Image (cartoon, helix red, strand yellow):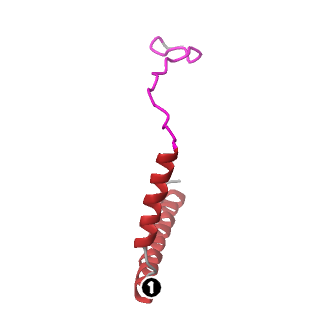
């Protein structure tokens, strides 16, 4: 064993996190649903044109990620034996 390596069996000290649990009350639940309902009231269905534009952009993004993954595969498979 090298001098500088520490024994991995020793337990490491984990710093304690002071995370407080949220207080759930009737008022906080009511406020959550009030905000949720407000967002739903503001939302609307997209028009056909908006839907097709969003779909096209999403499809292009998915294809780009797929092409990138395939190129990475080719690099690791054929260029880096």
Q: Is residue 19 magenta?
A: yes
- The residue carrying pointer 1 sits among few (fewer than 14), some (14 to 19) or many (20 or more) residues within 10 Å by Cα, namely few
Residue 59: image x %, image y %? 47, 77
- Name the residue: 42% across, 73% down: 43
Secondary structure beneath label 1: helix
Q: Nearer the viewer, residue 39 or 50?
A: 39
- Name the residue: 48% across, 38% down: 22
In the picture of the structure, the residue carrying the numbered disc 1 is 52
- Name the residue: 46% across, 67% down: 65
List the single residue furthest toward the bottom. 48
Residue 32: image x %, image y %? 47, 53
Q: Is residue 56 magenta?
A: no
Q: Quadrant of residue 10?
A: top right
Please provide the residue range marked out in magenta: 3-25
Residue 16: image x %, image y %? 46, 22
Quadrant in which the N terminus is drawn = top right
- Name the residue: 46% across, 69% down: 40
Residue 77: image x %, image y %? 54, 59
**Above or below, 55 relative to 3:** below
The majority secondary structure of the magenta stretch comes to: loop
């Amino acid at each position: 064993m090298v001098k500088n390596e520490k024994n991995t069996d020793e337990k490491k000290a984990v710093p304690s996190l002071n995370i407080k649990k949220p207080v759930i009350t009737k008022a906080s639940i009511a406020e959550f649903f009030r905000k949720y309902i407000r967002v739903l009231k503001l939302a609307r269905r997209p028009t056909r044109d908006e839907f097709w534009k969003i779909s096209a952009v999403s499809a292009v993004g998915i294809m780009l990620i797929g092409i990138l993954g395939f190129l990475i595969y080719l690099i690791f498979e054929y260029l880096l034996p």
